[in-house]
Image (cartoon, rainbow, N blue to C red):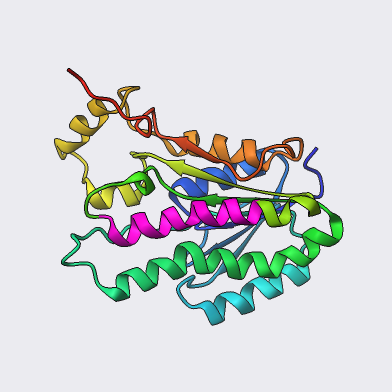
């Protein structure tokens, strides 16, 4: 049963985040979206807070207000960006910005909602990593900070398990219906078909594929699964050599 459960979702206005929000609403959750833009949909149980996640002071204020207004039971930190660049072209500013977005935001959010979760002795935290955390060229800032997300989930899982709070990560592969993907491979680019052919299931992922994985970890019944990373990547995390 999800009645009375409230989920905070970062980056929930578009792409994978919007799919996660839709699945949560369909599942009966109340949802609070943290994003720079407003969601494109309206719903009686949907609340939107517009905030720049790169601004930690603004985020701290926003999430403190959310924690005061809602009994938050679920936290889904989905927001992310890539900033692809070679080693030589990656700047310290890129690295610092993505460390803030992927790891710092998770910490700020968790620190705000954990007191309530611990009091109620229940919580579900789902963090978004990536298949690229296993290694991908031109992803210095993205790959390293998203790999850090996996370490964060494993560490937090151990610390929070006695309080009835699970922490897991979802690591998508190429998801073709997102602006993030299209920012790297525009529509009509022949690399799209080449990439799809290289994935064992022979297609790109869809946002709903990722949302279903998030819903598994979010399920109140799944309290015996924590500290795990689920790759939603069509098998590309396994790796294969064709001879």
The reply to whether the magenta stretch includes residue 192 is: no
Task: Name the spot of residue 69 as percent of width and height, x first.
Answer: 77, 69
Q: Residue furthest bottom?
A: 57
Q: Main secondary structure of the magenta part?
A: helix
**Which quadrant, please, contains the N terminus?**
top right
State the extent of the magenta-drawn residues as a range. 139-157
User: To which quarter of the image does residue 68 belong?
Assistant: bottom right
Question: Which is more toward the observer, 105 or 25?
Answer: 105
Q: Residue at x 21, y 46 (%)?
A: 186
Q: Is residue 68 visible?
A: yes
User: To which quarter of the image does residue 131 belong?
Assistant: top left
The reply to whether the magenta stretch includes residue 145 is: yes
Question: Which is more toward the observer, 127 or 153?
Answer: 153
**Which quadrant, please, contains the C terminus?**
top left
Side of 122 where 24 appears, left or right: left
User: To which quarter of the image does residue 235 belong?
Assistant: top left
Side of 125 where 115 appears, left or right: right
Q: Residue at x 32, y 30 (%)?
A: 239
Side of 235 where 44 appears, left or right: right
| Placement of 240 over or under 22, stated as above or below | above
Q: Residue at x 48, y 72 (%)?
A: 52
Task: Name the spot of residue 117 as percent of width and height, x first.
Answer: 78, 59
Task: Name the spot of residue 112 as percent of width and height, x first.
Answer: 69, 70
């Amino acid at each position: 049963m999800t009645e009375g459960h409230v989920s905070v979702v970062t980056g929930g206005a578009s792409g994978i985040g919007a799919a996660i929000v839709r699945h949560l609403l369909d599942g009966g959750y109340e949802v609070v979206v943290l994003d720079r833009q407003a969601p494109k949909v309206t719903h009686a149980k949907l609340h939107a807070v517009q905030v720049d996640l790169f601004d930690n002071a603004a985020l701290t204020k926003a999430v403190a207000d959310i924690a005061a207004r809602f009994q938050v039971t679920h936290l889904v930190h989905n927001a992310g960006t890539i900033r692809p660049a070679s080693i030589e072209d990656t700047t310290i500013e890129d690295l610092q910005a993505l460390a803030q977005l992927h790891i710092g935001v998770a910490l700020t959010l968790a620190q705000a909602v954990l007191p309530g979760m611990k009091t109620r002795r229940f919580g579900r935290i789902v963090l978004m990593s990536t298949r690229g955390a296993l290694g991908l060229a031109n992803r210095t800032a993205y790959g390293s900070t998203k790999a850090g997300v996996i370490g964060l989930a494993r560490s937090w899982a151990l610390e929070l398990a006695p309080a009835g709070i699970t922490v897991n990560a979802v690591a998508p592969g190429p998801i073709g219906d997102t602006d993030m993907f299209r920012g790297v491979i525009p529509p009509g680019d022949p690399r799209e078909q080449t990439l799809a052919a290289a994935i064992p299931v022979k297609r790109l992922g869809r946002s709903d594929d990722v949302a279903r994985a998030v819903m598994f970890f979010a399920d109140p019944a799944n309290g015996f699964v924590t500290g795990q990373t689920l790759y939603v990547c069509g098998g590309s995390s396994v790796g294969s050599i064709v001879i």
